[in-house]
Image: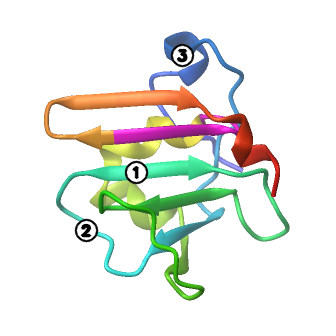
Amino acid sequence: MEPLGEPNPEQRFTCPVDPVGLDDMLAVAKGFSWTDLPINGLRHPRTEGLSGWYLWSSETFPEADDAFEAHHVRHLTHQRPEIMAYLALPAGWRFLLAPGYEDVWPDDSLLDV
C-alpha cells in the first residue's frame, strides 16, 4: 500500500496516523462535488473492503440508505488533492473544509459502529 497524505496529521493534529492507499475504498456521497467546497469527512474503523472514510459536500450528513457509493482513493488524488492529507487521520476523527476555513476534531462516537 502506498501511503498518502502530506503534511503528516500526527504532526499537525497530535494524533496517530492511519494512511490510506491508492487502492483503498472510501464512501463518497452521491452528488459529491468534485470541484466545490464544503467537504466533510468522517472516519469509522476500517472494515473489510472499506477504509472507514465517508465524504460528502453538503452541510448535512446524507441519511438515506443508498446515499453513498464506494470509490477508490486514487479517484481523489487528481480531483481533490487538498483532502489527501486528511485521509491519514485515524478512525474517530472528522474534518470540514470550507472557503477560508478548516476544522479537524476527534469524535469518539465514530468508533461505536
Secondary structure, mark 2, is: loop
* Mark 1 or 2, nearer chain start: 2
Question: What's the residue at 31%, 30% (across, down)?
Answer: 102
* Mark 2 or 3, nearer chain start: 3
Could you classify mark 1 by the number of other residues whose Cα lies within 10 Å: few (under 14), some (14-19), or many (20 or more)? many
Which mark is drawn over residue 40?
1
Image quarter of the C terminus? bottom right
Q: What stretch is highlighted in magenta?
A: 89-96
The residue under label 1 is which amino acid type?
Asn
How many numbered marks have been drawn onto this rendered protein structure? Answer: 3
Indicate yes or no whether the magenta region holds residue 103: no
Tell me if I can see residue 91 in this picture: no
Secondary structure, mark 1, is: strand
How far is disc 1 from disc 2 in space, using C-alphas? Answer: 11 Å
**Residue linked to disc 2:** 33
Closer to the camera, 22 or 63?
63
Closer to the camera, 50 or 20?
50
Tell me the quarter of the picture where residue 79 sits. Answer: bottom left
